[in-house]
Image: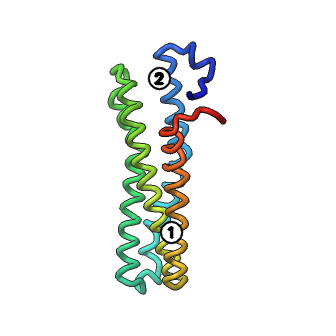
Amino acid sequence: MSAVNPSELEETEHERLDRELNQLLNELRVAMPGVQVLFAFLLAVPFQQRFTEVTDFQRDVYFVTLLAAAAASALFIAPTAYHRLMFRARDKPMLIHISTRLAVCGLACLALAMNGAVLLVTDVLFGRTTVAVTVAVTATLYVGLWFVLGLVRRVSGDGSY
C-alpha cells in the first residue's frame, strides 16, 4: 500500500494536474543545465587541436554521444513547446502524460550521452581494462539510480519508508 500525503486526498482534479505539472517542470529544470553543459562541451570538442588525432572508434563514440546529448536536449525542451502550442486547449492531462514520457526518454539519452563522454575521455587517457570497468560502473550507476530504483519500487508496491 502506498503512503499518501493527506493534502493529496483533498485535491481537486485541477489542483492535482497543476501539482503534477509543477513537479515535472521542476524535475526538468534540474536535468536541463547538465544537458546544456555537456552539449556545449561536445560542440566545442572538434575544434580542439588534438581532435584530429582521435581514432575512428573515438570519433564514432563522439558522434553518438553528440547525437544523444542533442536528443536529450530536444526531449527535455519538448514539453515546453507542447505546452505553448496547446496553451488554453484544456489538454493538461495529455500534456503531463506525453511530457512524462519525453522526460524519461530524455533521461535515457542523457545517460547514454554522459556514458559516451566518460567512454571517450577514458579511452583517450587509459587502457582498455580501465575503459571497460569505468564505463560499466557509470552505466550501472545511471541505469540503477535513474531507472531501476524507481521501477523496483513501483513494481513492489511497497509504500513503507
The residue that disc 1 covers is 136
Element under disc 2: helix
Vertical placement of residue 67 versus 78, above or below: below
The residue that disc 2 covers is 17
In the image, taking residue 124 as reference, residue 74 lies left or right, namely: left
Please tell me which residue is depicted at 35% across the width and 74% down the height of the picture.
60
Vertical placement of residue 74 versus 101, above or below: below
Q: Position of residue 63 (x, y in %)?
A: 36, 69
Q: Quadrant of the C terminus?
A: top right
Dot 2 crowding, Cα within 10 Å, few <14, some 14–19, many 20+: some
Q: Position of residue 31 (x, y in %)?
A: 52, 48
Q: Identify residue type, mark 2.
A: Leu
Residue most toward the right? 161
Vertical placement of residue 115 versus 55, above or below: above
Give residue 117's mark: none
Dot 1 crowding, Cα within 10 Å, few <14, some 14–19, many 20+: few
4 or 142, which lies in front? 4
Residue 112 quadrant: bottom left
158 or 116, which lies in front? 158
Of the two numbered discs 1 and 2 on the same chain, state the one appearing first in sequence: 2
